[in-house]
Amino acid sequence: MLDMSYQGKVFDSFSFDVEKSKIKELCLAIGDDNPLFFDSEFAKKEGYEETPVPLTFATLMNFWGYPEIWDRMKEVGIDVQKLLHAKEEYEYLAPIYPGDHIVGQVNVESMRSSTLMQMVTFKSQYKRNDELVLIAKMTIVVMEGEE
C-alpha cells in the first residue's frame, strides 16, 4: 500500500557524466540509427555543438545515475514486482551533450490509490552547472490483487 506521506518528497540528488558510449549503447538498444546521435560532423551541420542525447536518455540517467530509485519506490510502498510503466514525459530546455556533468533530483510529484490500482508520478529535474536543462516525469501503475 502506498505511503501517501511521500507525496511531494524530494530524494537525494545524484550526478551523471554523459558519455558518448552511453549515447551509442542506448541508440543501439532501441534501434535508433539516426546519425545525429553518432556523427559529430552531422550533428554540427544540424546546428548542435556535438552529438546530443536522444530524447529517452533521461530514463538512462535516472536508472544508471540513481539506482537507489528502486529502494525509494519500495519506501513509498510500491511493490516493484508488480509495477507497470505507464508513461514518460520529457521537457528539454537545452540540449545535453557528451562531457556534460548532470546533477539530477527526483521527487514524488503525485500519488493516487484506489482498490484496483495505485499510480505514482516521479518528477526528475536535471541541471548542468545550475542550469535546468531537462524535466522528466515517469508514471507507474501498481495493480492491486491477491498475493
Image (spheres, helix red, strand yellow):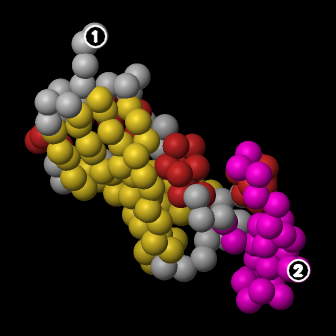
Considering the numbered disc 1 on the image, is that residue within a helix, a strand or a loop?
A: loop
Magenta stretch: includes residue 41: yes
The residue to which callout 1 is attached is 147
Q: Which residue in the rendered view is the most extreme toward the front?
A: 116
The residue shown at (45%, 72%) is 91
Q: Which residue is drawn at the image coordinates 40% and 46% (left, top)?
A: 86
Q: Tell me the residue that label 2 is attached to.
A: 41
The percent coordinates of residue 103 (x first, y second) are 47, 61
Dividing the picture into quarters, in which one does residue 41 lie?
Answer: bottom right
Please report the residue visible at 27 percent of the width from the left and 45 percent of the height from the top: 120
Residue 129 at least partly seen = no
The quadrant of the picture occupied by the N terminus is top left
- Kindly identify the amino acid type of the residue bearing the numbered disc 1: Glu
Choose the circle earlier in sequence order: 2 or 1.
2
Crowding at dot 1, Cα within 10 Å, few <14 / some 14-19 / many 20+, comes out as few
Q: Is residue 56 left or right of residue 99?
A: left
94 vs 87, nearest the viewer? 87
Q: Is residue 115 left or right of residue 91?
A: left
Q: CA distance from mark 2 to mark 1?
A: 55 Å
Residue stretch rendered in magenta on the structure = 29-53
Tell me the amino acid under the disc marked 2: Glu
Note whether 7 is above or below 143 in the view shown: below
Q: Quadrant of residue 118?
A: top left
With respect to residue 84, does 57 lie above or below? below
- In the figure, residue 147 lies in which quadrant? top left
> Could you tell me which secondary element the residue under label 2 belongs to?
helix
